Amino acid sequence: MNLRKYFIMGSQNCTGDLAAILEKGAKAGITAFQFREKGTGSLTGQEKLNLGFQLRDICTRHHVLFFVNDDMDMVEPLEADGIHVGQDDRHLEELREKFPDKIIGLSVSNQHEVDNSPIHLADYLGAGPIFATSTKDDAKQAVGTEWIKTLKRQYPGTPIVGIGGINDQNAASVIDAGADGVSVVSAITKADDINAVVASL
Ligand SMILES: Cc1ncc(COP(=O)(O)OP(=O)(O)O)c(N)n1
Ligand SMILES: Cc1ncsc1CCOP(=O)(O)O
Ligand SMILES: [Mg+2]
């Protein structure tokens, strides 16, 4: 499971063509992708599914892991490799039972969440927001790279990806803190040169 360069995107994040952005990212070396279609302006129903098929196909062609965000009903139709959920989403017990062989990621933003989560059912943890972000309206307070160190001490065998405000300038600090990968939205969707940003990440 290679989560080193984990790109997340939905149509609400872009003005341009999502398929073209993902294709560039995949060619440049992203290792994982999460289809996160949520928030103002996002697609629903069949339109969301159709976009999902298109993006899934790009990931298949480039051997990039494909995750869906939150929506467990899309996992099977899109033949996703896994699903990422947060604290207010479907419970890991239910997901693990339904998808015994899929990769399940869980967001954890503080110790209270860790203490109240079945971490042993998660295949990886999304830690953040590490830095301030304007991509997610309801993002929690930025926790800094110290949070990665704290998690890694407690769960040395569980892969951890940092998320939130990560870009090609600060990604190294996230990896240096012990993260196995960096998850980014705007660093790629807003990049002038996607190839350069992914290489630099
Ligand atoms: C890799 C990764 N980490 C964290 C998140 C955030 O998930 P969540 O807290 O459920 O928030 P939403 O993304 O659903 O708004 C993530 N999506 N991916
Ligand atoms: C989905 C999500 N979860 C925590 S922060 C965030 C958004 C990250 O976006 P960006 O990489 O643009 O800061
Ligand atoms: Mg969620």
Image (spheres, rainbow, N blue to C red):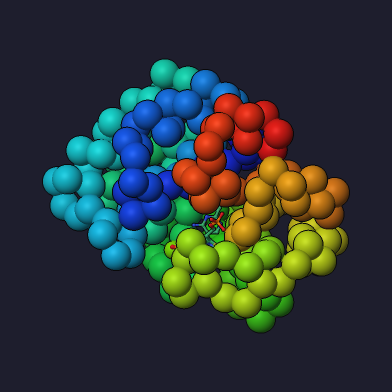
Question: Can you tell which quarter of the image residue 80 is in?
Answer: top left
- Percent x, y of residue 81: 45, 37
Can you name the residue that lies furthest to the left here? 46
> Which residue occupies 37% across, 47% down?
14
Can you name the residue that lies furthest to the top here? 61
Q: Is residue 108 left or right of residue 102?
A: right
**Quadrant field for ligand 2:** bottom right
Q: Foreground: 144 or 110?
A: 144
Q: Is residue 178 left or right of residue 141?
A: right
Q: How many marks?
A: 0
Can you name the residue that lies furthest to the front here? 192
Residue 97 visible, this orientation: no
Quick one: quadrant of the N terminus? top right
> Which residue occupies 67% across, 64% down?
131
> Which residue occupies 20% across, 38% down?
50
- Percent x, y of residue 176: 85, 49
Residue 12 visible, this orientation: yes
Q: Foreground: 91 or 14?
A: 14
Quick one: quadrant of the C terminus? top right
Question: Can you tell which quarter of the image residue 22 is in?
Answer: top left
- Percent x, y of residue 61: 42, 18
> Which residue occupies 80% across, 58% down?
152
**As drawn, 116 above or below 145:** below
Q: Foreground: 173 or 61?
A: 173
Q: Is residue 176 left or right of residue 122?
A: right
- Percent x, y of residue 194: 54, 32
